[in-house]
Amino acid sequence: MNFICDHTAAFLSEEEYNLYAARHKRALQTVDENAYPSDMLGWVHPEKCASEAICAQIKELAAEIRQNAEVFVVVGLGGSNQGARAVIDALSHTAAPNGPEILYAALNLSAAYYEKLLQKIGDRSVYIHVIAKNFKTLEPGLMFRMFRSYLENRYSKEEAARRIITTPTVGDEALHRISVENEYRYLPFPTDVGGRYSVFTPVGLLPIAVAGIDIDKLVHGACSAAKEYQTGGFVRQAAKRYAITRNALMEKGYNIEAFSFFEPQLEALGRWWRQLFGESEGKNHTALFPVVCSYTEDLHSVGQYLQQGKRQIIETFLHVCTPPTDKKVISESEIEDGFDYLNGKTFHEINECAYKATVKAHSEGGVPCMVVEIDNLDAYQLGELLYFYFIVCYYSSVLLEVDPFDQPGVENYKEEMFRLLGAE
């Protein structure tokens, strides 16, 4: 992995960067020294969240599900599914064949969406995975009730219990209690890890393993990045520079960050990134607003705004040096279509030209651009990347003087919704 911020030099001088870093020296040291006062830092040590024992249990359960299920429904919202979706979509080209289709419930409160899920399942064999750190959230609670009834009516209560896997906070009086009373198998949701930091726990690892992706390599990548962070290596230095740069630019009037990529299978990763930064930083009326751009499609829509709209956006490109697949362009000799300049080229060569042209055009047009670069889309490097972004968000939130691990604003709409629904 590589981090490049050369394209920001015209917008943030080294002197401005150093002054910002000096003013926030104590905050940076708090992160460097793991001295931030929080009981939600379990994710810093992925080797503990995803120990050999836990991973062995996950792989055994995933093997059973892959053998017996044609559909696997993940019942979870936000941090309870975003990490798994990001990895499953990004690494679909590496997945073992003949696994179940992964579907996601609890994304909304729409009856039409629920009915569509049932239609997709049809008469295929189905298991579900219910994930909730706090089982008071309405979406997973509603969907679990509906799918529990569906499974019991379709199979039997005993067979439904075998097909329901849960990931609760052990010891709670909600999902864990229900799991014990009904003999559902469960994997623990660590008490010291929040949802959006949970991809390297059973929350993310079980669906990823069911999808046929190598969770050992994913965890090893995260552990490698964690070691770099903890020992002051590249990951710490790059994450710190990234966090300082984006926040120093915000002080200069930039208030939006675009996360952009040129491989469409990274769209779910973009949603994961958006939640990580939006929910971690968006407090006290501060922070960059996170948006996601899938290129080249979005170059023909919001690309116009980035090029000539209000100068309020910084842009981070996730660049994959070697694509998951490539294909040579067909040479055409019979029809003069005006595209003979593509003869002999590959899709990757064309996509690379689009990427380089976009970075150049946007930076020269007034958009500070940064690049996070990985060699390949594989499980190890994706594990490194996800952990790197955890650390960036950790530094950045502390620089903003906000708690990276809570989401008090989310509760505001919930309280009114529960009141309207008559909940106690």
Image (spheres, grey):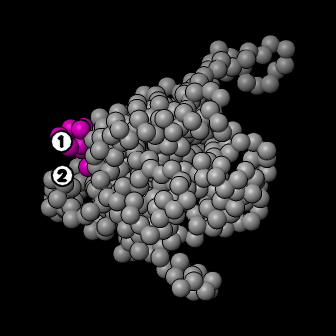
Residue 361 location, x and y as percent? 51, 43
SS at badge 1: loop
Residue found 34% across the figure and 59% down from its top: 191
Q: Residue 154 versus residue 217: which sits nearer the camera?
A: 154
Q: Which residue is mark 2?
A: 32
Amino acid tagged 1: Gly
Q: Are marks 2 and 1 in contact (CB under 8 Å)?
A: yes
Tell me the CA gap for discs 2 and 1.
8 Å
Q: Residue 183 versus residue 267: which sits nearer the camera?
A: 183
Compared to residue 249, the image places residue 351 above or below, namely: above
Circle 2 residues within 10 Å: few <14, some 14–19, many ≥20: some
Q: Is residue 293 left or right of residue 1?
A: right
Residue 333 location, x and y as percent? 80, 13
Q: Is residue 300 left or right of residue 18?
A: right
Q: Which mark is residue 232?
A: 1
SS at badge 2: helix
Q: Which range is magenta?
A: 227-242
Residue 5 visible within the image: no
Residue 239 part of the magenta-drawn span: yes
Amino acid tagged 2: Asp
Q: Is residue 175 left or right of residue 331?
A: left
Residue found 24% across the figure and 54% down from its top: 17
Q: Residue 138 versus residue 67: which sits nearer the camera?
A: 67
Q: Quadrant of residue 302?
A: bottom right
Q: Quadrant of residue 3?
A: top left
